[in-house]
Image (cartoon, grey):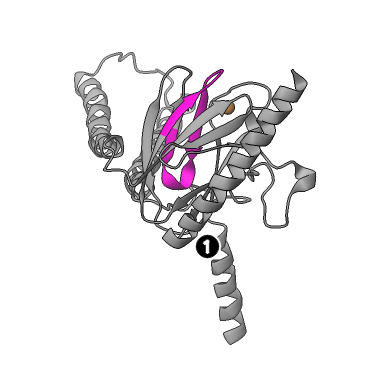
Amino acid sequence: MKKILLIISSFLIAVEAFANQPKDWQLGFQNPASDGMRDIVNFHNNLLLPIIIAISVFVLFLMLYACVRFRASANPNPSKRTHNVTVEILWTLIPCLILIVMAVPSFKILYKQDTIPKADLTIKAIGYQWYWGYEYPDENIIFDSYMVEEKDLRADQPRLLAVDNEVVVPVNKVVKVLITANDVLHAWALPSFGVKRDAVPGRINETWFKAEKEGTYYGQCSELCGIKHAFMPITVKVVSEEDYQEWLSEARIKFAEEEIENNKLKLASK
Ligand SMILES: [Cu+2]
């Protein structure tokens, strides 16, 4: 018995550890890691799903009932009726009411996500064909983030989702994300945070998230942007405040050095 419990608990823990990326045979959303995503998942699971299931069952029942009750063999002289005012009013009114019931909570969530609280830090994501560039405007950090090729993957890195330079943010802090693009339309999307915004050249879109759990979260460009659209993933690492400060001081030097190297190469090639 103990062994079985142990196996089950280890399985649950394993699932938890990978909760922030797509899984094989996954049904439904990734586990939420922010308040905004929890609202979306609750809205979907507790309101939309029951309504969809009820409608599907009802329509199936109507079809079966019509097939049996009005079959040709039982109705040699088919009815000539074409109108029924009561039924027509009902089938207009009921769907309207269902839509209103869905719209009210949906707008509530939308407006909540649209109001950006006072940000603890701001990052800027810039979509390029085909990678993401990031800036921490207050920290003077700029870097590019490319997908790790399959042959270079480490054992803990998922295929098509891992990147060389991850975005690092502190846990439980409001992160404001400014999103734009440099060439064509892209979209910065992170399912566990309930975040998805178009990256439009010449325009800056804003969104925000507050990650509640430390971990690595994966997302992808979600706007068809060309031949390598599928190969510009997004990786966000959520760490403790101390680890974040440590990363900041390392990143300032690392990315500045890379910048100097790149400029030297550019000068040399001229
Ligand atoms: Cu893209």
Can I make out residue 37 in this image?
Answer: yes
Is ligand 1 within 8 Å of the beta carbon of the residue shown at mark 1? no
Q: Amino acid at mark 1?
A: Glu
Which residue occupies the foreground of this view, 99 or 165? Answer: 165
Relative placement, left or right, of 249 versus 114 is right
- Residue most extreme to the bottom: 2
Which residue occupies the foreground of this view, 43 or 197? Answer: 197
Location of ligand 1 given as a quarter of the image: top right
State the image quarter where residue 133 is shown: top right
| Relative vertical location of residue 100 with respect to residue 194 in this rendering, above or below | above
Residue occupying the point 19% across, 23% down: 86
Asked if residue 210 lies in the magenta stretch, the reply is no
Q: Residues within 10 Å of mark 1 (few under 14, many from 20)?
A: few
Residue 211 picture location, percent across and down? 41, 52
Relative placement, left or right, of 31 versus 100 is right
What residue is pinned by disc 1? 16
Which residue occupies the foreground of this view, 137 or 72? Answer: 137
Asked if residue 186 lies in the magenta stretch, the reply is yes
Residue 31 picture location, percent across and down? 46, 53
Q: Name the quadrant of the N terminus.
A: bottom right
Relative placement, left or right, of 153 versus 28 is right
Can I make out residue 1 in this image?
Answer: no
Residue occupying the point 64% across, 32% down: 230
How many tags in the picture? 1
Q: Which residues are magenta?
A: 178-196
Residue 79 picture location, percent across and down? 35, 18
